Image: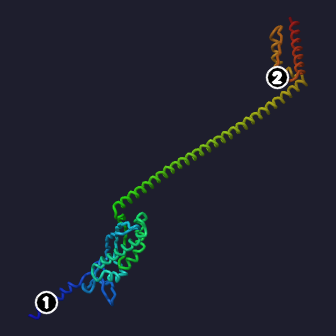
């Protein structure tokens, strides 16, 4: 009975020991073990507590404040914000830096802080306080952060400068005022450039409008010129047609006059002769007055004389016949 009780106690002790030593690896942990003087990563789900070391794989953020001096022994203060995580491919260096404990990454971060402080101090001593700027300091840190992170087994995920200012409040205030003046000057310069640009744009627009208006005027003038030329051509054609008609009319009248001249008896067939004969028959002792227009007189004096003689003879004969009847 005592033997069974002893065995049970031993079994319970062994089970308790196993429960105490055996641990389940969490997803955000990396488990390390040492073999042949080399730190390696345990890939299994379970590990023995005292034979392995569990470190967090999560990112670790820490601030860094550096008290440095610019050229001329002008003290300045730079505040950094650094985020780092264990570099698995160089995990052996992390253990060398931080030791075999769960806070190895914190000790490694302290070493990074010391190195960054040294880098910043070495850089600021080369320049005056006016020449230094957050962007330049950050650029210098980024150039050397990869070497620093590999050196201590941590990977720098992000690095930023929170502030950069002179330690002396008077110098800091003077720098702020100078920066404000510079910003105001640049703003005023930009405003003046904007005004100049606006004036140039307006001038260009006015020139373009004037040029377009000139083009419209020239086009209108050309259209009017074309229209006037067409009207002149039309008037010239009308005049030429009128001259042709007048010429044809003159030629026709010339032919008629030639025909009457060669055949005087045809004068009796003219409308003037017919009206004259009618008047002589209807009126007693009537005298016939024959008038000719200047245009008729221009047709020839000989023909006019012949026509007048013919009419007078005809009127005389008609009067004689009426007298004899009476």
Residue 91 image point, x, y percent: 34, 81
Q: Residue at x 42, y 66 (%)?
A: 128
6 vs 108, nearest the viewer: 108
- In the rendering, which numbered label is found on residue 253? none
Residue 212 image point, x, y percent: 59, 45
Q: Quadrant of the N terminus?
A: bottom left
Residue contact between numbered discs 1 and 2, judged by CB atoms under 8 Å: no
82 vs 292, nearest the viewer: 82
Quarter-of-image position of residue 214: top right
Pick whichever of labels 1 and 2 is earlier in the sequence. Answer: 1
Outermost residue, front side: 72
Q: Residue at x 87, y 25 (%)?
A: 257
What residue is pinned by disc 1? 9
Indicate left or right for 216 with 168 as reference.
Answer: right
- In the rendering, which numbered label is found on residue 295? 2
Q: Quadrant of the C terminus?
A: top right
Label 2 crowd (10 A; few <14 / some 14-19 / many >=20): few
Outermost residue, top side: 326
As drawn, 201 above or below 316 = below
């Amino acid at each position: 009975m005592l033997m069974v009780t002893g065995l049970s106690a031993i079994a319970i002790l062994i089970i308790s020991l196993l429960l105490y030593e055996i641990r389940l690896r969490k997803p955000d942990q990396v488990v390390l073990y040492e073999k042949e003087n080399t730190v390696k990563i345990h890939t299994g789900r379970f590990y023995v507590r005292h034979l392995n070391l569990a470190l967090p794989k999560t990112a670790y953020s820490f601030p860094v404040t550096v008290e440095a001096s610019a050229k001329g022994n002008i003290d300045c203060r730079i505040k950094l914000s650094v985020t780092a995580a264990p570099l698995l491919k160089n995990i052996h260096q992390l253990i060398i830096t931080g030791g075999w404990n769960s806070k190895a990454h914190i000790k490694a971060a302290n070493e990074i802080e010391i190195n960054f402080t040294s880098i910043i101090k070495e850089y600021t001593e080369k320049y005056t306080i006016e020449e230094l700027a957050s962007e330049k300091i950050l650029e210098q840190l980024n150039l050397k952060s990869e070497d620093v992170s590999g050196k201590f087994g941590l990977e720098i995920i992000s690095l930023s400068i929170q502030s950069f200012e002179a330690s002396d409040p008077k110098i800091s205030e003077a720098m702020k005022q100078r920066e404000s003046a510079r910003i105001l000057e640049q703003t005023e310069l930009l405003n003046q450039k904007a005004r100049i640009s606006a004036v140039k744009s307006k001038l260009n627009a006015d020139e373009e409008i004037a040029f377009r208006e000139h083009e419209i005027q020239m086009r209108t003038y050309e259209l009017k010129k074309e229209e006037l030329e067409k009207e002149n051509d039309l008037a010239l054609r009308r005049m030429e047609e009128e001259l042709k008609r007048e010429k044809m009319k003159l030629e026709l009248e010339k032919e008629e006059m030639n025909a009457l001249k060669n055949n005087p008896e045809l004068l009796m067939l003219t409308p003037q002769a017919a009206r004259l004969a009618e008047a002589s028959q209807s009126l007693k002792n009537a005298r016939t007055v024959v008038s000719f227009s200047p245009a008729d007189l221009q047709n020839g004096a000989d023909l006019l004389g012949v026509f007048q003689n013919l009419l007078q003879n005809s009127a005389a004969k008609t009067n004689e016949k009426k007298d004899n009847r009476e």
